[in-house]
Amino acid sequence: MALMSYAQAACSALAGAMRADAGVVALGEDVGNGGVFGQYRGLREEFGASRVIDTPISEATIMGAAVGMALTGLRPVVEMRVVDFALCAIDEIVNQAAKNRYMFGGQGRVPLVARLPIGIWSGSAAQHSQSLEAWFAHIPGLVVVTPATPADNYALLAAAIECGDPVIYMEHKELWGLEGEVPPEPTAVLGKARIARGGTDLTLLSWSGMLHTALAAAEQAALQGVSVEVIDLRTIWPWDRETVLESASRTGCLLVAHEAVQAAGFGAEIAATVAEALGIPVKRVGAARIPVGYARTLENVARISTQQLLQELKEFLNNRGRKRSMR
Amino acid sequence: MAPDTSEANDSPAERLLPLYRTMARIRAFENAAEEASRGSVAAFGASSDAASMIRGPLHLSTGQEAVAAGICANLTRDDYLTSTHRGHGHTLAKGANITAMMCELFGRGAGTNKGKGGSMHIADFAVGMLGANGVVAAGIPIAVGAAHSAKIRGSKAIVACFFGDGAINRGPFLEGLNWAKIFELPVLFVCEDNRYSATTATDAMTAGDGAAARARGIGIPAESVDGNDVLAVDAMARELVARIRAGAGPQLLHALTYRVKGHVSVDAAAYRDPRELESALEGDPLKLAGLRLAALGVAAATVAKIDTEVRNEIDAALAAAHSAPATEPDEAYADVQDLGAGQWR
Ligand SMILES: Cc1ncc(C[n+]2csc(CCOP(=O)(O)OP(=O)(O)O)c2C)c(N)n1
Ligand SMILES: [Mg+2]
């Protein structure tokens, strides 16, 4: 076990993959100097500038070139800094990386990992604060991953590099400094959720930064006598129906919370699936459909706080949940 | 081609004094903003401090003042301007209200954008300043569209389009310049070359001879200028703006300057040689302009008075921003869209 930050964990996973496979390369802006969040620190020193590739500010070509590299034998890890800038490369992701294998009759494979961090990045306003995981979940051909802890960032990034499909790897913009124990043997695999806290009265499902809010809300609910089971979905697509359905059928109700805008968010997909399969009460909690404003007062309106999540949880239990109610 | 400065009516000192004032104002604004932004963001190894008055990434234009001042001195209030993430200088030089700008950085309802944008999205449409931008090169097509609109509407307005050296490697640079040329639009493209793109020296990432050569390659006349010499920038801008107003179509100016601060205020720029900064500081645009004023026989007291006046302006703006109320939370729901407003979830 080693204590690592979320950024160091990813760096360590990437370094391991680069040591094991000479075909793994990283490319993007500022990676040579370690990345602006330290998520590539030391890699150029170890692997050289030909494998840790500094690029011009050319998102479309960074992503497009990665597709070309992946088609011809490399395993590129693509740095986009934040998901918001990946919008400058949306054709390359959606029409090229995601479609290639199918459209060309299975001749090609696009084993690339594109790092597109999501979430509100405090004080950086509307163009740097989006959570767009649902966009990518909507696109056939893509795997979408959202690690919430250092251990998962280590295990899931390694798994994403090995995966073989194009993976949209969405770290959280504000978790880079989060520290945690990282076991040397990976403790997560793609497509498998984790029960982050056991409980019996309600299933609270979340991922990425919101997982930590969910755990805090569960802690407070426990003080008030309500036992909340918290699931970290970890992979948005393909998502772990088995774990979610098993938990929800046990607790009898499901609340999905995410930082992304609630309308057309991925929570809707999960809630609908669970309602269809189990016929139990379901609820979504996501952000209002507003851009994230700069002022702290505005940013706070766009965030889901622990108190707000707890409140939603109480209302849900009181109005719809069957087993318990809370004051 | 050397610009013809003889047509200027003002004497060099008369021309330089207001330019100096604009630059000194920008410098004072940036210094104040830098001070108020300590701990504003967790990046570049710095951690964030919840007490910081200015939040998030703050991109300072310290040391680049001559470009903003020299270009904007040749624009009218009706002309338009698009900017970058490093836009305080452009905005001030275009004549935006200083207090409203500082309030914006402080997240106040009285800010230019009602506290919704902050530094990286600062805008003042009242003076034609169509916005700073968090996305590199995104201002270029917008500038081109504003110029296209001016042409369609028969307006006399022209557009100054600022972008960094790093931005010329994004597709919108090529697309925007090509568009401006085929429609012969009234745009002054200004590549503000501070040699860096975040932590990366731009030179190593840029093939060929850069912005001016690329512009010439598609038929846009382009000039280069010492971007720290405000009189040179002013003279060159005057020439290019005159051409644009005379209907000669888009022009490009490549202004070579230096990014004195880190990429954002919390970035110590540990990736560059400190000697490079030292030698760049010898060419500091304010220092150069001060020396030039002295050589032109302007009394030191006159210059000192300007320095004091702008510092007082900034102090007043700071005081106003400190005491102004934060943006009301309800403002979060205003100006999202017309149809569908109210349906938030
Ligand atoms: C499309 C896009 N890619 C990446 C970024 C991150 N980023 C912000 S500023 C910057 C460097 C820009 O360099 P330059 O254009 O020279 O402007 P400067 O910062 O030097 O003023 C980068 C890479 C961004 N904001 N937008
Ligand atoms: Mg630059």
Image: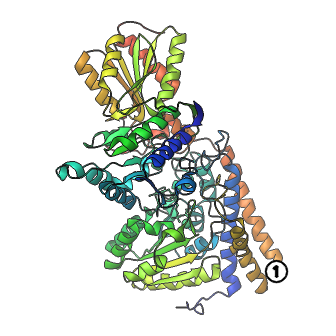
- Image: B325 above or below A285: below
Q: CB of residue at label 1: within 8 Å of ligand 1? A: no
Out of B34 and A240, give the one closest to the viewer.
A240
In the visual, does B286 lie left or right of A123? Answer: right
* Three-letter amino acid code of the residue under disc 1: Ala
Residue B236 visible in the shown view: yes
Q: Position of residue A176 (x, y in %)?
A: 55, 40
Splitting the image into 4 quarters, where does residue B96 fall?
bottom right
Splitting the image into 4 quarters, where does residue A168 fall?
top left
Q: Position of residue A15 (x, y in %)?
A: 51, 46
Out of B135 and B26, give the one closest to the viewer.
B135
Q: Secondary structure at mark 1?
A: loop
Q: Which residue is mark 1?
A: B299
Out of B323 and A124, give the one closest to the viewer.
A124
Splitting the image into 4 quarters, where does residue B194 fall?
bottom right
What colour scheme was applied to this rendering of the protein? Answer: rainbow
In the visual, does A92 lie left or right of B157? Answer: left
Label 1 marks a residue whose chain is B
- Image: B158 above or below A171: below
Figure disc tally: 1
**Label 1: how many Cα within 10 Å (few below 14, some 14–19, many 20+):** few
Residue B341 visible in the shown view: no
In the visual, does B93 lie left or right of A275? Answer: right
Q: Report ligand 2 position as a quadrant.
A: bottom right
Q: Position of residue A3 (x, y in %)?
A: 60, 33
Residue at the spot 65% in from the left edge and 52% down from the top edge:
B266
Residue at the spot 46% in from the left edge and 64% down from the top edge:
A56
Instruction: Give the position of the N terminus of chain A as an image quadrant.
Output: top right
- Image: A130 above or below A203: below
- Image: A208 above or below B192: above
Q: Position of residue A50 (x, y in %)?
A: 47, 61
